[in-house]
């Protein structure tokens, strides 16, 4: 028994060392191809690199279906009232569009936050699933719809495939031939991992998830319109009660809460990027009551609009000076 325990511990240490080595190589690759802070698309379709050399303020963003692997540093994402923290020990997966608050919480100029994001292609997931599970795939309308976001322990095989994909940036002529093969392997690892059941809902075109996605699409393009559940249910092709249940299962938000997040995030963007005042921004995103806008804005962002925007500008100025 003692020998068995020792072998297990040795195996765990060996795996941890291998993962650490791979993450170090991943950090080197990201640093070489992204020398400045920010997000950058690469020559490989759907592959993006992200870097931050210092902590960031909480910023609203809509996460689209993707997998994010962190080579260095940590990030916090807040969805509804739940906080998720991920770093080199985990990877983050999202399967639907989700309005979240994101913040880099571990980064320095000498050891910046470094991340690689691969956007998920539903068509590729579907084709791969049909090939790997032609008979055992479950019905697309059975089982429980799960939350469209998860933080999952990192796996060596997934990390290795991601490394090989990034190394293609050093040999651009190989990208058209080899990148699709490696991306296919990454999707296979994801489907085989702890998040596989949720991705199968995308790949199998789960009727309920399709309805939720139709509702999300409508809300993203009509967030400034008055909210009417009957209209949204008609667009989703579900009853109002069924849509509310499935929507909250996947996004952790009710449709009305989701719309409010989109409105408030867009208003914040308009005030910060276009220097609109709070009253004008609130009207632009569909609010009729400035006081209601201020209350809901403060509840989401922790401060009234004017104070929050001043804080963001101050933080941006400090970043520029450093």
Image (tube, grey):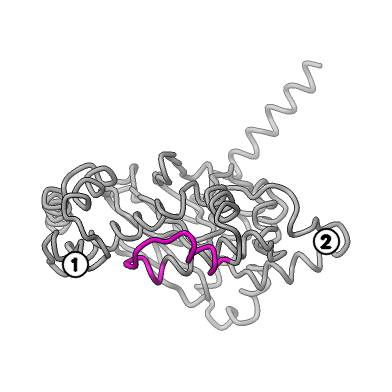
Q: Is residue 235 left or right of residue 316?
A: right
Residue in the picture at 18% in, 64% down: 281
Q: Is residue 182 left or right of residue 256?
A: right
- The circle on residue 205 is none
Residue in the picture at 24% in, 49% down: 297
Give the magenta-colored segment's residue range.
Answer: 220-236
Q: Examine the rendering and report whether any part of residue 157 can be seen.
A: yes
Return the residue at label 1: 273
Residue in the picture at 69% in, 49% down: 193
Q: Quadrant of the C terminus?
A: bottom left
Rendering coords of residue 289 (x, y %):
19, 56
Return the residue at label 2: 133
Q: Secondary structure at mark 1?
A: helix
Q: Quadrant of the N terminus?
A: top right
Rendering coords of residue 302 (x, y %):
23, 42
Q: Which is more toward the observer, 74 or 287?
A: 287
């Amino acid at each position: 028994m003692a020998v068995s325990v020792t072998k297990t511990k040795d195996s765990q240490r060996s795996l941890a060392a291998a993962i650490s080595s791979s993450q170090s190589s991943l950090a080197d690759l990201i640093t070489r191809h992204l020398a400045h802070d920010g997000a950058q698309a690469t020559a490989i379709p759907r592959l993006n690199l992200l870097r931050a050399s210092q902590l960031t303020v909480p910023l609203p963003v809509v996460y689209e279906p993707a997998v994010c692997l962190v080579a260095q540093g940590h990030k916090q994402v807040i969805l509804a009232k739940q906080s998720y923290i991920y770093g080199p020990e985990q990877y983050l997966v999202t399967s639907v569009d989700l309005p979240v608050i994101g913040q880099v919480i571990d980064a320095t100029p000498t050891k910046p936050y470094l991340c690689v994001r691969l956007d998920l292609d539903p068509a590729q997931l579907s084709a791969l699933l049909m090939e790997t599970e032609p008979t055992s795939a479950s019905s697309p309308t059975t089982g429980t719809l799960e939350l469209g976001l998860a933080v999952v322990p990192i796996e060596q095989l997934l990390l290795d495939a991601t490394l090989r994909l990034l190394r293609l940036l050093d040999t651009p002529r190989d990208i058209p031939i080899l990148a699709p093969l490696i991306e296919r392997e990454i999707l296979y690892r994801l489907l085989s991992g702890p998040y596989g059941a949720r991705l199968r809902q995308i790949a199998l075109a789960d009727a309920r998830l399709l309805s939720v996605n139709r509702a999300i699409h409508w809300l993203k393009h009509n967030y400034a319109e008055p909210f009417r559940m009957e209209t949204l249910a008609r667009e989703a092709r579900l009853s109002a009660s069924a849509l509310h249940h499935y929507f909250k299962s996947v996004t952790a938000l009710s449709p009305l809460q989701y719309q409010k997040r989109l409105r408030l995030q867009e208003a914040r963007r308009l005030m910060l990027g276009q220097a609109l005042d709070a009253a004008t921004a609130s009207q632009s995103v569909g609010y009729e009551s400035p006081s209601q806008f201020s209350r809901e804005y403060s509840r989401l962002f922790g401060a009234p609009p004017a104070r929050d925007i001043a804080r963001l500008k101050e933080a941006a100025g400090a970043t520029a000076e450093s």
